[in-house]
Amino acid sequence: MTSSRDAASAAITATVTSSRALLGIVARSMSGALEELSLVQFRLLVVLDSAGPQRMGDLAVSLGVHPSTLSRTVDRLEAGGWISREVSAESRREVIVAVSDKGHGMVAEVTRTRRRAIASVLRDLDPADREAVRIGMTLFAEAAGEPSAPDMLTLGL
Amino acid sequence: MTSSRDAASAAITATVTSSRALLGIVARSMSGALEELSLVQFRLLVVLDSAGPQRMGDLAVSLGVHPSTLSRTVDRLEAGGWISREVSAESRREVIVAVSDKGHGMVAEVTRTRRRAIASVLRDLDPADREAVRIGMTLFAEAAGEPSAPDMLTLGL
DNA sequence: CCAGACATTTGTACTTATGCAACTTTTGTA
DNA sequence: TACAAAAGTTGCATAAGTACAAATGTCTGG
C-alpha cells in the first residue's frame, strides 16, 4: 500500500521540481533587464514601480539600505533615465523618486516576458491538463500566501 | 459562456501567482547562506556541488566569467573553507576545485530548508487538495522541462 | 630538447554596492 | 526668532566582482 506519507512526499518533490522550472522561467525573463541594469538597480525599479513614487527615506527603508547608499544608486538610475527624482511639492527637504516611462517599460517588459513564457509552456498541454495545472497552482498559491517583501529582496525581486 | 481563452488565461495567472510564492520560498531558503556568502559565491558553490570537482578553466566557462575573475572568487571561497583547490594529479598546470564538507553542508542546508518550507505549505492542505497540487505541479514541470544552466545562473542558482 | 601552446595566477584598473560621519538645507517649535 | 530635528547628499573608506594584459609554470610535438 501507499502511505499518506509517501503521497505527501510525492507532492513535495513535484513542487520542488516545478519550482526549479519556474525559477528558470523567471530568471530568463529578467535576463534582458540585467544586461542594462544591475540586480540591485532592477530591484529598486520593481519596488518603486509597484509601490509608486516614494520619498528617498521611505524607499531606503523598503530596500533595507542606508540612505547614502540609496542616494548613489538613484544617481545611477537617474543618469540612465530609468527614474526621476524631484523635490517634494510639500516639503523642500524631501525628495520624491518615481519610475520613468522607460523604467516602467522595462519592468512591464519583464513581466510580459514571464507571462508569455508560462503561456508557452501551458500551450503544450491539452485543456484538461491545463485545468489541472490551474487548480494545483491556485491551491498552492493560496496555501503559501503572498511572499514577504524582504524575502523577495533576497533574490533582487 | 467561458471561452477557452479565458480558461488558458486563468491557468497562466494562477501559475504566475504561484511562481511568486515559490520564489519567496526559494529566496527565504537562501537567506541563511547569503549572510555568509555573496550571491556570486553561493552560485559557484551550487554549480560545483552539482557538477562535482572541476578544473578552473571549465568552471570559468560554466559560470561565464573570465578565468582571472574566477581565480579571485575561488581565493575568497577557499579562504572561507567552502572549497578546496589543488593541483591536478594528471597535469600539474591544471587546478581542480572541489566543494568542501562545509561547502556541501551549506548547499544541502539550503536545499533542506527549501523542501521543509514547501512541505510546511502543503501540510496545510487536505489530502485531496495536496494530490491536486501534486498533479498540477507534475504536469507543469513535465511541460516546462529542465531549466538551462545559464538561465539559472541569472538568479545566482 | 625546446618553442610554442596551454592553464592559471598576478598586476592593474574600473564599477557597483555598501556604511559611517560630516555637511547643507529645510522644518517645526519653544 | 533661534535652535534642534529631519531629510538628503557628499566625502571617505572598503569589499566584491569584473576584465585585460602580462607573468609563471607546465606540457608536447616536431
Image: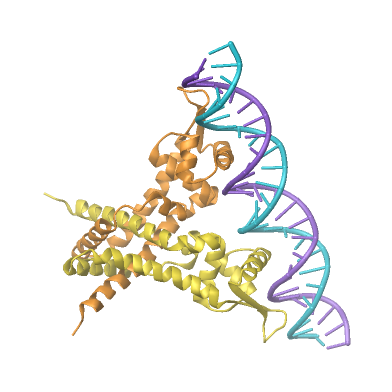
Chain colours: A orange, B yellow, C purple, D cyan
> Is A132 left, or right, of B39 in this rendering?
left
- Tell me the residue at 45%/51% (across/down): A153
Image-quadrant location for residue B141: bottom left
- The answer to whether one can see residue B35 in this image is yes
Image-quadrant location for residue D15: bottom right
Q: Position of residue B4 (x, y in %)?
A: 18, 54
The residue nearer to you, when weighing D2 against A106, is D2
Q: Position of residue A65 (x, y in %)?
A: 52, 45
- The answer to whether one can see residue B144 in this image is no
> Is A4 left, or right, of A61 in this rendering?
left
Q: How many marks?
A: 0
> Is B64 left, or right, of B86 in this rendering?
left
- Tell me the residue at 48%/52% (across/down): A32
The residue nearer to you, when weighing B106 against B90, is B106
- Tell me the residue at 54%/50% (across/down): A38
Q: Using the image, determine if residue A87 lies above or below residue A68.
A: above
Q: Position of residue A75 (x, y in %)?
A: 58, 37
- Tell me the residue at 42%/51% (across/down): A150
> Is B34 left, or right, of B19 in this rendering?
right
Q: Position of residue A48 (x, y in %)?
A: 44, 40
